[in-house]
Amino acid sequence: MTADRNALDPAFPQPRPEVESLHAYSAPLEGRRQMLRLDFNENTIGPSPRVVEALRAIPADHIAIYPEYDGLREAVVSNLGLPLQPDQIGLFNGVDAAIHAIFHAYGDRGETLLTTSPTFGYYTPCAQMQGMSIQAIPYEGEGFAFPLEAIRSGLQSTPRLLLICNPNNPTGTRLAPQRILELAAAAPQTLVVVDELYEAFTGDSVLPIADFEAQPNVLVLRSLAKTAGLAGLRIGFAIGHAAVVDRISRVTGPYDINSFAVTAAFAALKDQAYVDGYVAEVIQARAWMAEQLQAAGVRHHVEGGNYLLLWPQRDPGVVDQALREAGVLVRAMTGKPLIHGSLRVSIGTLAQMQRFWAAYRRIEALPG
Ligand SMILES: Cc1ncc(COP(=O)(O)O)c(C=O)c1O
């Protein structure tokens, strides 16, 4: 007999109805360590050696005391090189935690989240757990263009939140930062959250042109997970008007970011050259991949971000599995609106992409 161990007996204490009907965002699978991991858009070579050095130098007593955050906001400001104040930087246990906190602070039952589709998978459960309704506007056409007019008209009914992932994960769609500020200007009662996790791969950011005093309804998310390679330590930032950052920070715990993440963040923020070098390598590998796919006649979509979409001829589940057997992990976009049947492949170094491409060509029996 296989009983459902998660079935909730009516005699047990009952959670909120929103939680009972929630489908949580599924976390990465186990057993990824020995593989070429092109499935979660992570940094594929690890953080700066200075980060590793700083972590190794942590004294034992550091582990026994609660984390201290002094100077970290200042370090983020100085890394960005923009005229921001430290109280405009919110510190979170990864951008996932920032997103969760934004919904917790701003997303009321019956209010609306306006966003695009397909986009990053964590926005939906966060909206659902607050009892919000979701208006997800599809990207447009073969090239997955940003649905600017539809978003503009969606803003007329004053949704509580607009989430724009720029460039979008997984389509890579880019939207000019100026357009985002125009949308925000047209909807001052909507908090416009710009998820810039992959901004380093396009250079499109609202930060250099945003005036948070004039537009306090704009909030920008940045993380050290992807480019700086700290995904396992969990640290991310929400950047905006001090009052907005304060409200979002109110719904987090006092020590949600651990000391290891703080130490690593200081070291990573000081070594921007390492991140810039990695990003340049990925952008070069992305161009190489696009050339190969083009020459081989494989349907694909490459735009922003350290990832691309491609459509295998064979069943994508079978190709996904065959790649896994060859030691390469990618992410099947099964069930995702508009891109069902595609695989999302993260971009690493040129050597890593050559390895991926050799395996893919063999599995799909492509000539050359
Ligand atoms: C668009 C987007 N936003 C946020 C996150 C989460 O970032 P973090 O690792 O900082 O929590 C991811 C991670 O995949 C992402 O793709």
Image: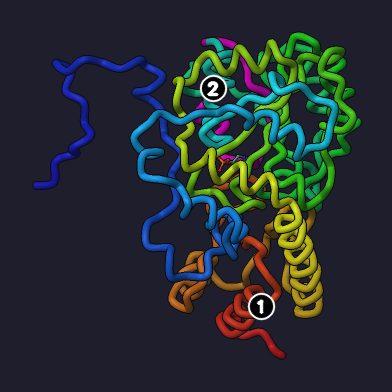
Residue identified by numbered label 2: 101
Residues in magenta, as a range: 109-126
Viewer-proximal residue among 363 and 13:
13
Q: Is residue 274 visible?
A: yes
User: What residue sits 71% from the left and 47% below the top?
Assistant: 198
Q: Amino acid at mark 1?
A: Ala
User: What residue sits 84% from the left and 22% below the top?
Assistant: 183
Q: Quadrant of the C terminus?
A: bottom right
Ligand 1 image position (quadrant)? top right
Query: Residue 257, how many percent across, how many down?
Result: 48, 32
Viewer-proximal residue among 278 and 169:
278
Q: Amino acid at mark 2?
A: Ala
In the picture as drawn, the residue positioned furthest to the left comes out as 1
Could you tell whether 212 is left or right of 55 in the image?
right
Q: Is residue 341 visible?
A: no
Mark identifier at residue 351: 1
Q: Bin the neighbour count of mark 2 within 10 Å (Cα to Cα): few under 14, some 14-19, many 20 and up.
A: many
Query: Which element is circle 2 on?
Result: helix
Could you tell whether 92 is left or right of 7 in the image?
right
